[in-house]
Structure formats: structure tokens, C-alpha cells
Amino acid sequence: MKSMTIAVRLTFFCLLFFSLLYPLAVTGLAQWAPNAGRGEQVVREGRVVGFARVGQYFSREAYFWGRPSAVQYNAAGSGGSNKGPNNPDYLAEVAARVDTFLARHPYLKREETPAEMVTASGSGLDPHISPAAALAQAKRVAEARKLPEAQLRELVARHTRQPLWGLFGPACVNVLALNVALDEISDN
């Protein structure tokens, strides 16, 4: 009987702690985080166009594209496909993505296709691509926008975030921020 009493007490304690106290504590601590833990909104012309840390789908020729998403960029259900690198379905999916990418970028060779443009990220929400992946798309975007390619290459360079202290992580470009800046250039 003593074991049963301990088990019931522990159950009620865990229920109270993990369903009420812990969430309240985390919510309280988040108030000191940037944007009070609500995410970094990207605003253009007074309208929220997205969040800086969540990838979005861009398919038009006039925009830079982000990584493919196994969850169609649904932030409520982030995740990968869980298909291994030797899975025939996964290999067929990547091959189809390569073919599609090359069809829209005929100036590239197959071996020049950036890996992140044909493979989904683990979360399915990655908002960044490498500078090389952005530069691979610059010609297509320049032609669609009727802008000089050199201007877009400079825009990519300005939006490239270098690793912290030159040590932590690779250089990357936020696709949403890059596309917002691209729209601002085109509007002028």
C-alpha cells in the first residue's frame, strides 16, 4: 500500500509540475528573450511577410528558392522524411529534384547543383541556404527580374551571414530576407 501511495503522489506531482509549473516558468523566461519569445517577424511595407527563423516556399522564377521541405514548411509539424540515404524512394525524389532544378537553371551542370537545393533539411523549416546555392540561382532571378546579375550577386554578398567569430557554423543566407530585399530593389 505504501508503494501505491508514493506512486500516486509522484503522478500528481509530475502532472502538476509538467503541465502547469514548467510551462509557466518557460513562458515567463521567454519574456526576456528577443521579441518576448514570439519569433522574429519580417515586415515589409507595414505587413508581416514571414518569420526570419522559419523557411518558406518560393517557386516563382523571380525569387530565390530555399531548401525543399518534407513537411511543406508547416511549422506546426516540423520534421524530416526519415528516409535514409540508400532508400530507393528517397533517391528517386532527390533525382527528380535535381532534374527540376537543372531544367530551371540550364546554365548549370549536374555536378554544380547545390546539395541543399535538392535535399530537405532535418526540420523541414530551414530558412537558410549557402551563399553558393544563392549564387547558383542569381542568373535565373536576374533574368526574371530584368536586373544585372552582378547586382544580385552583390545583394547575396550583403545578405550573407558569416559564422560567429569565424568558428561556429557555415556562412549562410536567409532566403526570406534576401527576397524581401530583392522586392525592395525591384520596387525602386
Image (tube, rainbow, N blue to C red):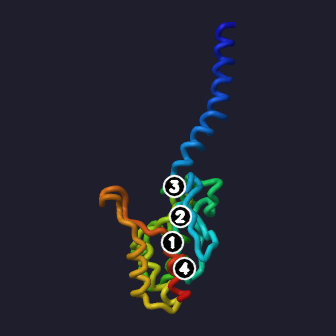
Residue at point 44%, 83% (across, down): 152
Question: What crowding class fits label 4: few (fewer than 14 Cα within 10 Å), some (14-19), or many (20 or more)?
Answer: many
Circles 2 and 3: CB atoms closer than 8 Å: no
33 or 91: nearer the eye? 33
Secondary structure beneath disc 1? Answer: helix
Q: Earlier in the sequence, mark 2 or mark 3?
A: 3
Q: Amino acid at mark 3?
A: Pro
Lateral position of residue 167 relative to residue 3, left or right: left
Q: CA distance from mark 2 to mark 1?
A: 7 Å
Mark 2 crowd level (few <14, some 14–19, many ≥20, 10 Å Cα): some
Residue to which mark 3 is pinned = 34
Q: Relative to 1, is 86 on the left or the right?
A: left
Q: Residues under labels 3 and 1: Cα distance?
A: 18 Å
Disc 4 target residue: 63
Disc 1, disc 4: CB below 8 Å?
Answer: no
Q: Nearer the viewer, mark 2 or mark 3?
A: 3
Q: Residue at x 40, y 71 (%)?
A: 160
Q: Which mark is residue 52?
A: 2
